[in-house]
Image (cartoon, coloured by chain):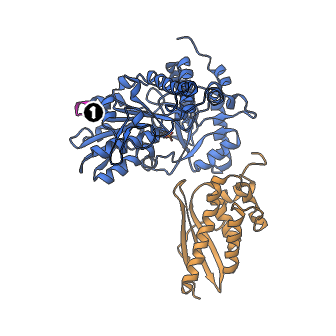
Chain colours: A blue, B orange
Amino acid sequence: MAAVDFEALRDDFPNLADGQPPLHYLDSAASTQKPACVIESIRHCYAHEYGPVHRGLYPLAENASENYEAARRTLARFINAGTTDQVVFTRSATEAINLVASGWAATHLQSGDEIWVSQMEHHSNFLPWQRVCNQRDARLRIIPVDDRGRLDLENAPELFGPRSRLIAISQMSNVLGTINPVREVVEHARRHDIPVLVDAAQSVGHMPVDVQELDCDFLVASAHKMCGPTGIGFLYGTSARLRETEPLLLGGGMVDEVGIDHSSWAEIPARFEAGSPNLAGAVGLATAVDYLSTIGLKAIEQRVRDLTDYAYQTLEAFDEVLLYGPETGNERGGILSFNIEGIHPHDVAQVAGEQGVAIRAGHHCCQPLMQRLGVSSTARASLNFYNNEQDISALADVINETVKLFGKR
Amino acid sequence: MTDQSIYRAVLLDHFHNPRNKGDLGDMQIVRRGSNPRCGDEIEIGINCENNTLESVRFRGRGCSICLASASLMTESARGLKLTQARDLIEKMQLWFGDQGGVGPPGMGLAALGSVRQHPARKKCVLLAWQALDEILDEIERHPEIVGA
Ligand SMILES: Cc1ncc(COP(=O)(O)O)c(C=O)c1O
């Protein structure tokens, strides 16, 4: 693996390169910055290659359809899907999870069945299951999280029990940075024929993700968290599971034949993509995938790990700082949640903002996890490969300043 | 911190040395204000005599803006007639509303103005004021509580 010059890659990101005063962007877990190639591909699509997808027989439209399907092929290769039609474009990871909850769970759950999620799930991977369980008289069960922010599988003895009908867990926690042993969970679940949905919103584009190696039934992610545009995400599903899934949205483009009393659906994946497709979004996503692949996902993962180590140790050195989640090392991605003793995280984030450091403060759409941690909110710094040492020093300055302003005197 | 900082000296002073903060055990009416989204949680208590807020106190936890605003509120509301207090709350809400064209309702509160350009924090400022507003509602409904 040739060494990648990550410092030079910062110039690919207009928002980081232009910044005057400099922007220390430590909020990539919310959404990543966009490289110029992605922005340009979207502009080019609208300016020169724009036409309706799967709806026209003239060259412009045919080309648009081809570009859309080429994006699907690129994405399928990226996550190593067995076949291209296992990749369904959605608006977001959120929509993809809702699709499985309404389209698969709602039609397969019996009264008394269980869906399992973990205590660290994003509301996106929690609420759709809560609702479908309530509707079907099923139970939502929770895999607990241990004191170091890891899945406590030992204390979920019925996870693979006879009533367990679906397991939905994140590959990387958007609060704790924990990387969950998804492969291990799937292996167990397989033996009991329990499907597993992987919320990979924080992992795809940040580490190598191979759906065949994971052997999961469903996997979801959003383009905007992997250097792509907003408004597009995807669902991967095995062919067998997708065949068992009903579409979430009905409308144009997803039907074979429409009658007054009955209609039949188009083939997969078109069946799940009602409405005019998001061509520019798909093109932008494919460009992001190419961009990340060129850098190399292993190199990206290592770079973020090095930055995370450094950030973890920097924060840990402050007596006032309480860090959540696994200790630095292999078990965590580039997400660091923390609190400063006696100081509200909003004040930390506000001081940070005034110093050009973008961090997030709040419950991060993970209220069940906040309850487990016994806090109402945390401050969160999240890293991507385009961050550097200066970003982390700037964060240390923020903590010093915050303690100076609000600490006990 | 720069001049644009929302953490003006006045706010920091009220955060570090809150006025009228502490036990609400002997207050006639206590109302809670909370913002579960960020974990701000405060209680406001009052004693009222002859339609005048004789004392206004608070306790709770939250961000510096929320606590400083509560402290400032207790200072500016104490000694006001109920109608004046209502008027002050209304002016605060207008000042922090979307309308524009309304200035701070008094020099002592001007320091909160720096928060106006941060929409996400407005709720933190108004929490204490809303709780006081609810107390005034309660007095209107049940004047006997304050011996009127
Ligand atoms: C772990 C996780 N799952 C799901 C989502 C939802 O992603 P989106 O809002 O793009 O649908 C997020 C976004 O914050 C996330 O971090």
Q: Is residue A170 visible?
A: no
Horizontal and vertical percent for residue A125?
41, 43
Which residue occupies 66% across, 38% down?
A357
Furthest toward the left, the residue is A162
Furthest toward the top, the residue is A2
Q: Return the residue nearer the eye: B7 or A133.
A: A133
Horizontal and vertical percent for residue A8?
66, 19
Horizontal and vertical percent for residue A272?
41, 37
Left or right relative to A77: residue A338 = right
Q: Return the residue nearer the eye: A247 or A399.
A: A247
Q: Indicate whether A378 appears above or below A82.
A: below
Horizontal and vertical percent for residue A77?
45, 21
Which residue occupies 58% across, 56% down?
B62
**What is the number of callouts on the image?**
1
User: Under 8 Å from ligand 1: the CB of mark 1?
Assistant: no
Location of the N terminus of chain B (image quadrant): top right
Label 1: element kind: helix
What amino acid is at disc 1? Answer: Ala
Q: Is residue A268 visible?
A: yes
* Chain at tag 1: A
Q: Indicate whether A298 appears above or below A31.
A: above
Q: Indicate whether A292 appears above or below B32.
A: above
**Residue A225 figure quarter:** top right
Left or right relative to A248: residue B71 = right
Residues in magenta, as a range: A188-194
CA neighbours of label 1 inside 10 A, class few (<14), some (14 to 19), many (20+) = many
Which residue is tagged 1? Answer: A189
Which residue occupies 65% across, 45% down?
A402
Left or right relative to A80: residue B70 = right
Residue A95 falls within the magenta-colored stretch: no
Location of the C terminus of chain B (image quadrant): bottom right
**Residue A228 figure quarter:** top right
